[in-house]
Image (tube, rainbow, N blue to C red):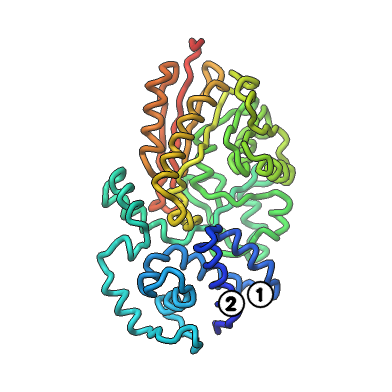
Amino acid sequence: MKIHRPLLQGIVTALEKIFRDQEYSDKVLERLFKQHPQWGSRDRRFVAEMVYDSVRYYRLLSTLAQSETNFWYISGILLCLKNSPLPEWPDFKHLYPDQIVKQHALLKGQFNIIESYPDWLSLLCEKELGTDAWQKEAHAMNQTAEVVLRVNTLKTDKATLINALAADGIETEEIDNFPSALKLKKRQNIFSHKRFKEGHFEIQDAGSQRISEFMNPKPGQTVIDACAGGGGKTLHLSALMRNKGKIISMDVEAWKLENLKKRARRGGVSNVETCLIENDTINRFKEKADMLLLDVPCSGLGVLKRNPDTKWKLTNESIERTKLTQHQILNDYQHMLKPGGVLVYSTCSLLPSENEQQVEKFLARYPEFTYESSLHLLPSEGFDGFYMCRMLKHKTAS
């Protein structure tokens, strides 16, 4: 496609917001597209891909540009690496495609630059995972995330939805071992589709869907989703419970719970109550839950495919603070679980210090809990990275 200057100007402006003002790509792009309603789907796709690839490969591109703030050069170098013609504009003066390709080749073997990760982050992940395992996952997380739907079985079934979307030119394919998941064959905007507006499906990565399936809730149970956020797992739990029983979805942010209520109405979910977490929440719900999901805040290292900003905004200190939060949530929130109930702890992190090690410390402190099973999903397997662990609280607990 011919590259028009307003598109490149939009990309440069977006990158300035992301790297200078520390904003997040999705919010920046959302605002940018509202400011330019005249851009068609092809233009928006080009801008989004350029912005996300610039963020993913920021260290590589800024190294080749010899500047961390010349976003015209960074955009131009990305075009060269994509084998796209470089517009003959003054902004790209002294950028020579052949020279850029040669300089890129000379960086071969410098993993942190080629794959674009901060040295401190690679060092941490190599220490916890091992060099080979980390480099495999780090490379996988630079691939573009698939768009995955979750079929809302409260309103439809997989075969019906496949046929309905296909009738409108939206091709999907099933994913082995993920019973409610469909993957788009071609990336496109489906939020305006009538089936989405009618609540027949949600956008939810296959890895995220696995957590609710791993919990295996039963109709009629009382389930607490104590870190519900936007509610993707809550809605899936409701479908698995066939709208029977009760799900209490909690969060510290009221606006997230309001969004959850809207999604629940759209999806025909009727067994969900929302609860803003306050000082007395744990006492009010003490030993009320048959199942407790603690999908705790984490570093987010498992979801870098869709949130590449994270690797530039994380710090060692922020990860340490997050681990303290995880420890506190595990220790405090477990009191909401009945004796005989099941606790599921989950993160979207790859780090054992956020995953197995947190569980080990918890089990050592609370002997009334026993380990049942756990599961790792890795980005190299195709979707987002998650850890989940299932623990049983003995009925003899006091």
Label 2–label 1 contact, CB within 8 A: yes
Question: Of residues 112 and 172, which is closer to you in this image?
Answer: 112
Q: Badge 1 is on which residue?
A: 39
Q: Position of residue 45 (x, y in %)?
A: 57, 70
Looking at the rendered image, the quarter that the N terminus falls into is bottom right
Choose between 109 and 24: the one closer to the eye: 24
Q: Which amino acid is tagged 1?
A: Trp
Residue at image location 40% in from the left, 86% down from the top = 94
User: Which disc number belongs to residue 214?
Assistant: none
Label 2 neighbour load within 10 Å: few <14, some 14-19, many 20+: some
Kindly tell me whether residue 393 is visible in this rendering. yes
Q: With 236 as the anchor, is 324 left or right in this view? A: left
Residue 164 horizontal side relative to residue 94, left or right? right
Say which quarter of the image contains residue 284. top right
Residue depicted at 49% across the width and 12% down the height: 397
Disc sitting over residue 7 in the figure:
2
Label 2's element? Answer: helix
Residue 392 rendering spot, x and y as whole percentages:
47, 22
Percent across and percent down for residue 5 are 58, 82
**Please, what is the three-letter code of the amino acid marked with disc 2?**
Leu
Quadrant of the image occupied by residue 97: bottom left
